[in-house]
Amino acid sequence: QVQFVESGGGLVQPGGSLKLSCAASGTIDSIYAMGWYRQVPGKQRELVAVISSTGLTNYADPVKGRFTISRDNDKNTVWLQMNSLKIEDTAVYYCNAHPVAMANMNGWGQGTQVTVSS
């Protein structure tokens, strides 16, 4: 099992940008597809971006063209660059393995709060 620590969240105005970081306690190289998830109170956690072990990416429709996921296997780190932020992007963001069944086996970190507000 690998643990993940997210950072980089904060308060930003609509249209602004943030870059989230995710540090893994162990190696993520060829084992994991990695995802960034987000959760709003009262709603299910949703996958917003995923990157394969070889760098292929996919995004949820609401964030396509605005968010970019990247990873550095040597540094065991995953990032999420978020541009053109909208109020509806407000959530706690988590990183973990993909698919979610594997993520649940790892357990979830505390996440990082992103608040988009004017």
Image (cartoon, grey):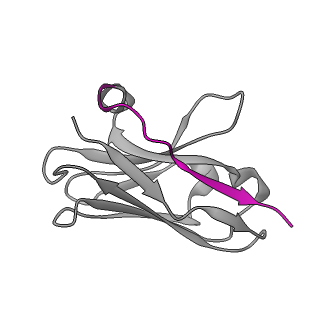
Relative horizontal placement of residue 98, taking residue 49 as reference (left or right)? left
Q: Residue at x 39, y 47 (%)?
A: 35
Relative horizontal placement of residue 32, taking residue 65 as reference (left or right)? left
Where is residue 52 shown, x and y percent of the image?
A: 27, 51
Q: Which residues are magenta?
A: 105-118
Quarter the N terminus occupies? top left
Where is residue 26 shown, x and y percent of the image?
A: 18, 49
Q: Residue at x 56, y 58 (%)?
A: 64
Where is residue 112 shown, x and y percent of the image?
A: 55, 52
Magenta stretch contains residue 49: no
Up-down: is 57 above or below 109?
below
Q: Residue at x 87, y 67 (%)?
A: 118
The furthest residue to the right = 118
Q: Residue at x 52, y 65 (%)?
A: 8
Up-down: is 12 above or below 37?
below
Up-down: is 101 above or below 14?
above
The furthest residue to the left = 30
Relative horizontal placement of residue 40, taking residue 48 as reference (left or right)? right
Relative horizontal placement of residue 4, taking residue 44 as reference (left or right)? left
Where is residue 42 shown, x and y percent of the image?
A: 72, 27
